[in-house]
Amino acid sequence: MTEHQLWPVPTPATLTAYPVEGGGPAIVVLPGGGYARQAGHEGEPVARWLNTLGIAAFVLRYRVAPHRHPLPLLDAARAMRFVRHHASEWGVDPLRVGVLGFSAGGHLAGLLATETAAMLPEGPHDEIDRKDARPGVAVLCYPVVTLSGAPAHQGSVTNLLGPEPAGAQLAGLSLQHRAGPATPPVFLWHTTEDDVVPVDNSLLLASALAAHQVPVELHVYPNGKHGLGLAEAEPGAGEWTTACARFLRTQGW
């Protein structure tokens, strides 16, 4: 386990590597926290679980409030590029780098998976910026999807965009409007008891992905509060890791 600064000029964004022996695929992990913080139980424990599947994991500490969009997205894109740039050092297959996010981290993972622009910062660029920032697969766990309407998580909206975001910005960063034929395969899970980020978020995204014929697997579990992480003690929802591992294998991870 080693922590790396992502940018030439130090920022709060860091990437902690959890490599595996023998090399293979990799996944960048984005913990949730409403774009205000990052939940510890959605970071290292998830990386350790991915390691048991033979997948190298990289936990990103991305910038949150008072930092605004697009800085979290630029951090996530940089993390993907950073892993691919250093792939030979970690034994990672650069063609098999995915993303996994929880809650607001799920929204950030979804932004990364649906972005068509270059996702590059202003100013000088380096060799890392030449790498592809798009994930080959996306796992979204009880994600924030829509930024407007009843299902929206207003805390995430305010922390990401400020107190008075424009309507066009809300629509443009809502994942159901961004899904398209180029979106990579997606695994989604949620619970119907989630009263923080309603299950409607995952239902909206699954429908949009299916409309574009993007491979999508959705699991909705009846019980469980928001923020379960690995959900090891939760009957039903605790099965998501088994289902996800099977999904990843079918995608070559």
Image: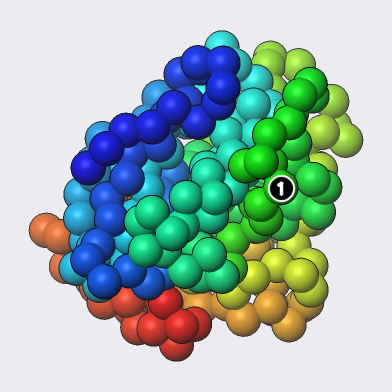
Whether residue 145 is visible here, answered yes or no, is: no
- The residue that appears at 46% across and 83% down in the rendered structure is 252
**Left or right side of 172 for 111:** left
Asked whether 93 or 54 is in front, the reply is 93
Whether residue 18 is visible here, answered yes or no, is: yes
- The residue that appears at 84% across and 25% down in the rendered structure is 166
Report the label total.
Answer: 1
Q: Quadrant of the C terminus?
A: bottom left
Q: In this view, does 189 lie above or below 242?
A: above
Asked whether 7 or 253 is in front, the reply is 7
Residue 25 locus on image (x, y percent): 41, 69
Among the 4 quarters of the image, the one containing residue 54: bottom left
User: In the rendered image, which residue does mark 1 sit on?
Assistant: 130
Residue 13 locus on image (x, y percent): 47, 26
* Element class at badge 1: helix
Q: Quadrant of the N terminus?
A: top left
Residue extending farthest bottom: 250
Residue 98 locus on image (x, y percent): 50, 62
Q: In this view, does 51 lie above or below 73?
A: below
Q: How is the image coloured?
A: rainbow
Among the 4 quarters of the image, the one containing residue 179: bottom right
- The residue that appears at 47% across and 69% down in the rendered structure is 93
- The residue that appears at 82% across and 33% down in the rendered structure is 169
Q: Which amino acid does label 1 sit on?
A: Arg
Residue extending farthest right: 168
**Left or right side of 15 for 79:** right
Asked whether 154 or 13 is in front, the reply is 13
How busy is the neighbourhood of tag 1: few (under 14 within 10 Å), some, or many (20 plus)? Answer: few
Residue extending farthest left: 233
**Left or right side of 130 for 75:** left
Asked whether 167 or 136 is in front, the reply is 136
Residue 3 locus on image (x, y percent): 32, 33
